[in-house]
Amino acid sequence: MLLSLIDLPFKLDKDNFNIFIIISFILSTLSSLLWFYNSKSNPPKPLPSKLAQNNKRKPGHWIPEDYKFPKPQPYPNWNIYDSDPIAYRPFKHKYNVTMGIRNMNPEEWIEIDNKWLEFHELKKQRLQTKGKDLYGTLPIAYDASLELLDELKNYLPERYPSMFKYNSTTGVLSNLITGEDWGTFDLKTKEIDPMFIITNLLQDDIAIMIELEDGQYYLKAGAIVLPGFWRLTDKLNMPLSEIHTSGDVPKYNTHLKKSMEKFFTRLKPETSVLRNNYFIQTDKHLDWSSSIGKESEQGVGWYTAPVATDINQIYYRSERQSLRKLPKTGAVVFTIRTYFIPIIEIVDEPYVPLRLLNGLTSWSNDVREYKGFNKFKDVLLPYLEGKAKEQEVLGYTRENEKDNFPL
Ligand code: HEM
Ligand SMILES: *[C@@H]1O[C@H](CO)[C@@H](O)[C@H](O)[C@H]1NC(C)=O
Ligand SMILES: *[C@@H]1O[C@H](CO)[C@@H](O)[C@H](O)[C@H]1NC(C)=O
């Protein structure tokens, strides 16, 4: 076992496993009895998508579909120690604010790599010190959180069989790397937030968006543990538009709002999508960018950050985000996976310095404001110019660059 287990009430070891089984049995008997007495709480049976006709639904009234996500193949040649993070370099020579989404092969939903242990250790520390500030499920999203956990239980052991194992007799999902057992899938006592378990399985942060009767999607559950620049408590309960306008996301109202809302309304379980973004950070903290201010304080942002003076302070931060619609509850699951690398490392990659330099300098003023351009430009731009010149001599010029650089 590589990590010592934290002593939490729902962590199952062999001694309390039997108690767990007995309690589950009593609870499930009780709940079937309740079910019998109160047939109104009988959840509707999932229908085939065609019959459910959710494209004609009343806003906020999703009809459960019996769609099943395809079983993924095991990730090829994967192991937790040697598989490097995928090198997403989504910056282009010219920056443009767009939705920037592409279809996702459902098999590629969750990425795990050799940084998992580091992410997990940091998540554990933060969960211990900050607890429920970092995750939560509002009552309206409880079934969605459970559905997500259930999907992960189906997905992870198929995709990463050397890391996860699910025992269908006991309902326990085991992490074979850490020895953690997560065994609460049938235990609907609501004592454990499913989001706590979910965040312990993944490198990603997670947000669950629920459609209400006004047709808008609201942030109703999440585990935002390694966010860099925002906090769950800042945005919980907000609709999609307010999440973005409260943070002054550039051109949200003019370039994003309409297409994003239409996209959310029309999203189906059968079509999941991905997008990637990038930021520059002026400190080395994956979990919370300390240079913009204290995590515990309101009114922090780039405007309170000091100007960076040392290139070693500068980090490249990029998120891979996925969106998928859960068939039973109709909730939208948003995953945010962060890739975080010192800038001095990525500039050695062919074509990167020039393309990043061009990308950054093409930011419009509002994007510059939003992404802290003035706080790093004096140290980063000359450095990238120098590296781009070195590469030019070697033939890594814009003319020679192929267009299909990694997204
Ligand atoms: C198609 C879906 C979405 C698109 C196109 C989108 C787009 C964007 C863009 C362009 C930004 C600015 C940073 C960047 O360059 O990425 C941003 C920031 C952000 N987005 Fe989204 N977003 C989407 C979905 C969501 C969802 C579902 C959430 C739910 C939590 C969310 C939460 C945020 C937050 C918290 C920020 C930072 C805001 C701040 O700075 O205060 N986004 N988004
Ligand atoms: C930028 O995106 C907008 C749509 O949001 C599009 O109309 C415009 O042509 C794009 N510009 C470039 C340079 O790609
Ligand atoms: C599931 O767990 C039970 C109880 O510990 C054990 O007897 C059984 O062998 C396990 N099944 C699998 C497939 O590992």
Image (cartoon, rainbow, N blue to C red):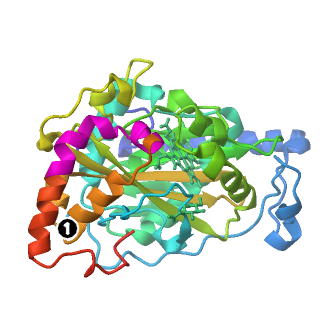
Q: Where is residue 378 in the image (x, y as percent from the top left)?
A: 20, 40
Residue at (82%, 43%) from the top-left corner?
Answer: 35
Q: Is the magenta stretch mostly helix, strand or loop?
A: helix
Q: Is residue 6 visible?
A: no
Q: Nearer the viewer, residue 273 or 196?
A: 273
Q: Is residue 321 found left or right of 50 in the rendered image?
A: left
Quadrant hosting residue 49: bottom right
Q: Does the magenta stretch include residue 395?
A: no
Q: Is residue 377 magenta?
A: yes
Amino acid carrying label 1: it is Asp
Q: Is residue 117 visible?
A: yes
Residue at (25%, 51%) from the top-left corner?
Answer: 117
The part of the chain drawn in magenta is 366-382
User: What residue sits right under mark 1 in the picture?
Assistant: 82
Residue at (29%, 64%) from the top-left corner?
Answer: 355
Q: Is residue 401 found left or right of 34 in the rendered image?
A: left
